[in-house]
Amino acid sequence: MTPKEKTLQRIQDLGILAVLRGPSQELTLKMVEALVNGGITGIEITFTTPNALDVVQALAKEFRDDIVLGMGTLTKPDQAKNAKNAGATFLVSPHTEEELAAAMITTGLPVMMGALSPSEVMRAWSLGSDVIKVFPGSLGGPGFMKSLKGPFPDIPMMPTGGVSDKNLGDWFRAGAFAVGAGSNLCPKELAMAGDFDEITKIAERYIAAVRAAKSNS
């Protein structure tokens, strides 16, 4: 199994990625620590996070292989190489664009491109996306993704947006490869208030929900 295949397998086994748009570099690092304490070890740091590359470098140094660390919200081709150099092991974009796709794929890392409509899904897949990020997942919900899986049963899909510990089972029953969870899992407000213990408790609830969902899907 190649390193890329191993990373994809780890993400699928974990079942969930925490998508972090932290309010600051310091608070983002503390948010990740709180999530890891709660059992969430799939971490996606978005480029919209302040000093995002520095955050990823620090996390890669601190946690090494204990977490699966990636970068998301890639919108510019040069971000792909920079993310890999910082220590990212997978790349995620909110959309599909040819030049960006090529830059992401050139890194050799697992790639997840954003798509919503059937045409967008097929375009992302044809450009080499390993997993389709169904975004925003909240727009159509699990039922919409299940409909997408009808004509595309062999294309791995990961919904992001609108994922909660209450509907995880619905997403996995709809055929999710994994799910991405953002503000519901790790609210900025809790981080800014210094309530990292509560973030850990939320992470624990999500992990329990993922385990239950995967065992019943």
Image (cartoon, rainbow, N blue to C red):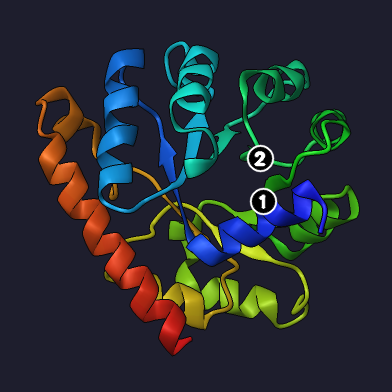
How many marks the image carries: the answer is: 2
Q: Mark 2 and mark 1 in contact (Cβ < 8 Å)?
A: yes
Q: Position of residue 195 (x, y in %)?
A: 10, 33
Q: Earlier in the sequence, mark 1 or mark 2?
A: 1
**Who's the residue at 84% across and 28% down the image?**
103
- The residue tagged 1 is 7
Q: Position of residue 92 (x, y in %)?
A: 64, 40
Left or right: 204 in relation to 169: left
What amino acid is labelled 2 in the image?
A: Phe
Residue 198 falls in image quadrant = top left
**Who's the residue at 11% across and 26% down the image?**
194
**Who's the residue at 52% across and 33% down the image?**
64
Q: CA distance from mark 1 to mark 2?
A: 8 Å
User: Can the viewer see residue 86?
Assistant: yes
Vertical position of residue 144 compared to residue 78: above or below = below
Left or right: 172 in relation to 100: left
Residue 90, numbered label: 2
Q: Secondary structure at mark 2?
A: loop
What amino acid is labelled 1 in the image?
A: Thr
Crowd tier of the residue under label 1, counting other residues whose Cα lies within 10 Å: few below 14, some 14–19, many 20 or above: some
Q: Secondary structure at mark 1?
A: helix
**Who's the residue at 55% across and 16% down the image?**
53
Residue 144 falls in image quadrant = bottom right
User: Who is closer to the viewer here, 188 or 108?
Assistant: 108
User: Can the viewer see residue 67?
Assistant: no
User: Who is closer to the viewer here, 84 or 105?
Assistant: 84
